[in-house]
Image (cartoon, helix red, strand yellow):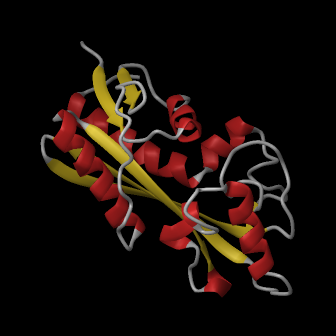
Amino acid sequence: MNDLKLIFATHNLNKFNEIKKMIPKGIKVQSLTDLNFTCEIPENENTIEKNAIFKAKFIYSKFNSTVFADDTGLEVDSLNGKPGVHSARYAGIKRDSTKNNEKLLFQLSGIENRKANFKTIISLVHNGKVYLFEGKIVGEIALSQKGSHGFGYDSIFIPDGYKKTFGELDPNLKNSISHRSIAFKKLMSFLKKISDLKN
């Protein structure tokens, strides 16, 4: 059986490498960089779901091939769900993770309720139809940045049941419990059903 070929609508090498480690045999995934597609995909929607759908549809319209895209947001209870859909550019348009973390920690100074959740929505466009898969993990925001693994808000997010941030956890452990892996496992389960893939 030929490998199922997918396009992951991202230029983000960190995201792509995280997903690549979870890919079962029989599935070949290419990033936009692999395809020499250098255009920036607009992310102007007002929800995580809409952003994921727009990105997947946008790339599907360019390549007419099965494509998935994700959008992720960190939602902090005491900040009414912020940064949410604006997580990547929370401290400015340049997507600076360090500044995003610093801004969030500053806003939570002196606030006791640090509960938060990480949410990933994966949008798959297959034969022109859109399918959505959600992954969510609950936790809290640390008092300071800790750990050197991961990216984005990993250094300040402590998942429930653990005492360390994603940035401190072993990357394989983090990848097995993360919001992205939860959504991705749902995507893979769906793809296996429609293509009779065997592990």
Point 79% across, 77% down: residue: 106
Point 52% across, 69% down: residue: 86
Q: Is residue 127 visible?
A: yes
Q: How many marks?
A: 0
Q: Position of residue 82 (x, y in %)?
A: 58, 78
Q: Position of residue 57 (x, y in %)?
A: 23, 50
Can you tell which quarter of the image residue 59 is in? top left
Q: Is residue 159 visible?
A: no
Residue 102 vs residue 137, the one in the foreground? 102
Give the position of the C terminus as an image quadrant.
Answer: top left
For residue 190, side relative to residue 147 (left or right): left
Can you tell which quarter of the image residue 196 is in? top left
Q: Residue furthest top?
A: 1
For residue 54, side relative to residue 84 (left or right): left
Q: Position of residue 35 (x, y in %)?
A: 34, 26
Give the position of the N terminus as an image quadrant.
Answer: top left
Q: Is residue 56 above or below residue 160?
A: above
Q: Residue furthest left?
A: 128
Point 62% across, 42% down: residue: 176
Residue 193 vs residue 93, the one in the foreground? 93
Q: Is residue 112 above or below residue 76?
A: below
For residue 194, side relative to residue 175 (left or right): left
